[in-house]
Image: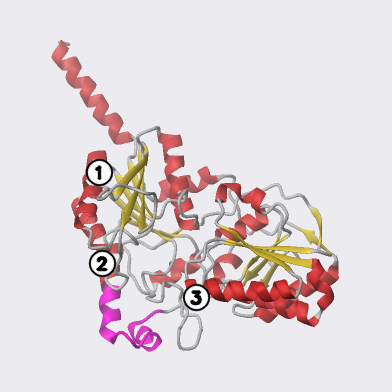
Amino acid sequence: MNAGSRKMLKKSDSILEHQKVPRTVYFSFCHPDVSPGGAQAVAKRLHDEHVRKHGVGSSLFIGAMIGGGPKRSAGSNLIQVKSDEFIYICDRFDYLYFTNYDYEGQQAIIRLVESFDPTQLHFHHFMGFGIDFMFALLSSSKAKKIFTIHEHMLVCHNDGHLVQKNNNGICDGPHPARCATCMPEYRYDYFQHRLAHLASIVEMCDVVTAVSEYTAGVIQRSIKTREPIVCIPNGPFKATVAEGKIDTNTLNVAYIGQVHQTKGVHLLLAAIESLVEEHPEYAKRISITIWGSIVQPEYRKKIEAQLARLHALEVRSRLGGVYSSANLKNILHDANVVVVPSLWPESYCITADEAVMLGKILICTEFPAATERFESTDSTVFVSPGSAVAIERAFERLLKAGSVEISSNMKFSYKDFSEIFELYEQATL
């Protein structure tokens, strides 16, 4: 074999080797190191696991942000934070037409993706990037297209929360007529066009996954995908929870997550206020820390007013501020109760997993994604959504009991995140 043939064979082997190793670009709304959140944390962990399994240079992570983010020079909207991690910052985003009007920024991402030569494009959101960007990239790329659904914005214009504005009921069967009744400021045909537009993007994808069976069902009833939506939960993971009893003579309560109206934080604070007003002796036996960012100025005023009333009742209460998910064990060290008081049927809610895995008592709104994963026990208490009274009664039962038995209640679990990564790889074969 001559030198030229050996060179061609070596080049051919190199091409074959390149084809064997998947090269994936993960698109996420936000970067978890800048803005904590379940969806971006999972997207980043998939990227990290991809690199661990397939080697350095096999994956790119691009997190989009709307305003804010790291300080940068003028015009530099695509920032490289690590060799294989980028943050894309658009200054504004149109929530009606789901575009950022940033043609140059979108082109910069497309050039980056093309230079990487991916075999897979894995979208975890369209926020920040824009639907027009997704359409351009999905149309031009020969890579396999994957879309993971972390929430319900595809079918619900009320921030994807599925809460009907006119009656606060849960909508699990979105339809333009129902949407127009819920949000009469928009014409009926807007919802028809909106659904058709977003559905056209999802239908371009080869594989669509969702993080809970409930979310898969909600989306599948409105959008016809090439194949049935595959459910791949974000957890929970097997944990060594010390069996035994938790002392509930004193309740150190924690809330973790975005502090937003739909998260029901005001209901949690109202429950404690009502409980202490009815039983003043409980004031010294209960405390509350709210961890997370507050994105709505008016809601901040409401929460701060409630905390002030609790202070007046001599209840220890405070805002803990933004937290790091990597530091959660330390954050929750002194807490024995974690409350998830959401008003909407969350598509997953990692906070519930974390509470159970850390051996805390969990008081959680009874939404499908949570009951898919956990049995109801003395240490995992499900309450009616939107009910401060139900949360108050759960606190009262704990205080009167004096202790609660911790027991394993996971309906299923994973050994570690590598098992979840393997499920994605199997789904995208």
The one nearer the camera, 166 or 315, is: 315
Please give the name of the residue rendered at 48% of the width and 60% of the height, measured from the top-left corner: 211
Highlighted magenta segment, given as a residue range? 174-196
Q: Report x, y in % for residue 16.
A: 27, 30
Q: Earlier in the sequence, mark 3 or mark 2?
A: 2
Report the side of 61 relative to 167 (left or right): left
Please give the name of the residue rendered at 46% of the width and 41% of the height, measured from the top-left corner: 49
Q: Which residue is mark 2?
A: 200
Examine the residues drawn in magenta and state their main secondary structure. Answer: helix
| Circles 3 and 1 in contact, beta carbons < 8 Å | no
Please give the name of the residue rendered at 46% of the width and 83% of the height, measured from the top-left corner: 164
Q: Which residue is mark 3?
A: 298
Q: Earlier in the sequence, mark 3 or mark 1?
A: 1
Q: Amino acid at mark 3?
A: Glu
Q: Is residue 242 visible?
A: yes
Instruction: Kindly report the distance in space between the C-alpha atoms of the residues bearing marks 3 and 1.
Output: 40 Å
Q: Amino acid at mark 1?
A: Leu
Element marked by disc 3? helix
The one nearer the camera, 314 or 157, is: 314
Q: Amino acid at mark 2?
A: Ser
The one nearer the camera, 241 or 322, is: 322
Instruction: Kindly report the distance in space between the C-alpha atoms of the residues bearing marks 2 and 1.
Output: 24 Å
